[in-house]
Image (tube, coloured by chain):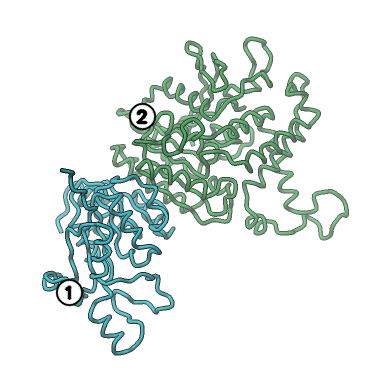
Chain colours: A green, B cyan
Amino acid sequence: MPSQGHTVELGRDVPLKLDCGVKLGAFTVAYQTYGRLNEQKSNAVLVCHALSGDQYVASTHPLTGKPGWWHILVGPGRPLDPERFFIICANVLGGCMGTTGPASINPETGKPYGLTFPVITIADMVRAQAMLLDHLGVPDLFCVIGGSMGGMQTLQWAAMYPERVYTAIPIACAARHSAQNIAFHEVGRQAIMADPEWRAGEYSLHNTTPRAGLAVARMAAHITYLSEAALRRKFGRKLQNRSAFTYGFDADFEVESYLRHQGITFVERFDANSYLYITRAMDYFDMSADHGALANVFANTKVRFCLVSFTSDWLFTTWEMREIVHALNAAAADVSFVEIETDKGHDAFLLDEPELHATLSGFLNAAAERRGVAPAASP
Amino acid sequence: MNVGAGARTDLTRADVRRPSDIRVDLQMIADMIKPESRVLDIGCGDGQLLRYLVQTRNVVGRGIELSQAGVNASVAQGLSVVQGDADSDLSDYPTQAFDYVVLSQTLQATRNPRRVVSELVRIGRKAIISFPNFGYWKVRWRLLTDGRMPRTGALDYEWHETPNIHLCTILDFVDLCDTLGARVERRISMTSGGRTSLVQRSLHVANLFGEQAVFLVSRQQPQPAR
């Protein structure tokens, strides 16, 4: 689908003050846009991507050649239709698809940042996105939406810039990263750092990458995106192109082969240090840490929320989403909450779930009507 | 029914059901609600009443529904509804957060009706509660003549599969309101045909001839100190 890829340099005049205390001046944000901002500037939608996502929400990925990661929801005739909305998706701060991150060149040294890149938070990512909106002349967002880490950014947007958010749709996320999720992230980071090719984060200076470590990190993480039921349904104990065990450590089982493939392909498109930084940002995420009770974060909010969880998601459980709903109820906020029945686990938010489609269409249409955003012209 | 221009545009996003086609008891509840008010509908089902209120009364509507299918259907129509339980989730809401809190045909299925009613009058300036009247003469007659748990139009379940675990009569409900210090502002009881006129006057007559009842209740304002 037609889209425009852009990069912009931000923070040169007013640097971005990061949570860690560092002031980041002159950084790049890479983003895609779809559709046009209307005259009233009332139809902007910010799509926030997940840990391993990027700005190619609805356009072919330049490295993998695969369709956009949310082309099911973003596109003509879809719930987020560029005929109706001006859709923006930016690579997060710390990412590796064009926005400044640890793989970028530090202008002060002329060398890649590596581990000298400041540790960033979800709030820092959102601050960078807000600067992008300023640059684009977008005063406020009709909607901010995202799943997983994108959902965290969505919540952060609603908390930090409530006056710039009309509706917020956090999907399959939580208001704080759980101990179990931090534990899985730590496994991934240790896998990367244990790879001798990681070279204390300076692998690019040695023209190498910690491929094995990053692949293992991805494999471990990928298990958490699925569910036991989905693994059983898709793979069971089926063998991979063979009729008997090899009595060795080759990928005898289909599920092993699948995971190895996930690991290997991920290495082709993702930077290992970015993986360290972004998982860290998720680990640090805890919305109630600064504000006390979660309900206080959203006190008197005018933002209209629609939360979605999936029954078999054990990474970001319905229980965690419901905790946010309780807090929003206590704040007397306008909130909808839908739990969708599926065995596809956390990954369900990226897949073709008709009920997700129906929920988002209903919620977005009603909100757009209320805000007077004209519907897409019929073809 | 003649719908206003505002309501007509809303119909495009709703489904084929016209807003006038709502259950007679829901219509009665709707008639108690002032336009432009804030309404929480507890046990909102697929959002029939909420949608009607949003379209014809221009209310700010919220819903709670136990069944996921009901929640999903409501949200897909653009209503603000969360999955939740009247017994456990009302304590989240701030005091007097709504002008009206509606509990339609749900009280008898709650685990702790007394606590639910006290929460309703805390959260809402007014609570509208409808329930099947177990004092209805047909219920009494069936039990008397058959000697078995009565089944009627409003209570059409076998005893072992009914979700209605806390049935009460109109008199019982009035007693509960007294106990909680809640003021009954209006009471409507309906015959099975949906008629209301004959049975209003005496509480005991209403308790005998009303198959269902709708109450408008509010928290007793404390008397100002002298």
A231 on left or right of B121:
right
In this rendering, the answer to whether A5 lies above or below A155 is above
Can the viewer see residue A42 in this picture? yes
What residue is disc 2 on? Answer: A163
In this rendering, the answer to whether A327 lies above or below B11 is above
SS class, disc 2? helix
- Residue B34, given in percent of the width and then of the height, sits at 18, 50
- Give the alpha-carbon distance from disc 2 to disc 1, as whole Å: 55 Å
- Residue A354, given in percent of the width and then of the height, sits at 47, 53
Identify the residue shown where x is 67% and y is 40%.
Answer: A183
Give the number of marks.
2
In this rendering, the answer to whether B108 lies above or below A301 is below
Chain of the residue where label 2 is placed in the rendered structure: A
Q: Amino acid at mark 1?
A: His
Chain of the residue where label 1 is placed in the rendered structure: B
Identify the residue shown where x is 62% and y is 31%.
Answer: A280
Pick the quarter of the image with the C terminus of chain B: top left
> To which quarter of the image does residue A37 belong?
top left
- Residue B50, given in percent of the width and then of the height, sits at 28, 54
Identify the residue shown where x is 24% and y is 53%.
Answer: B219
- Residue B93, given in percent of the width and then of the height, sits at 36, 47
What residue is disc 1 on? Answer: B204
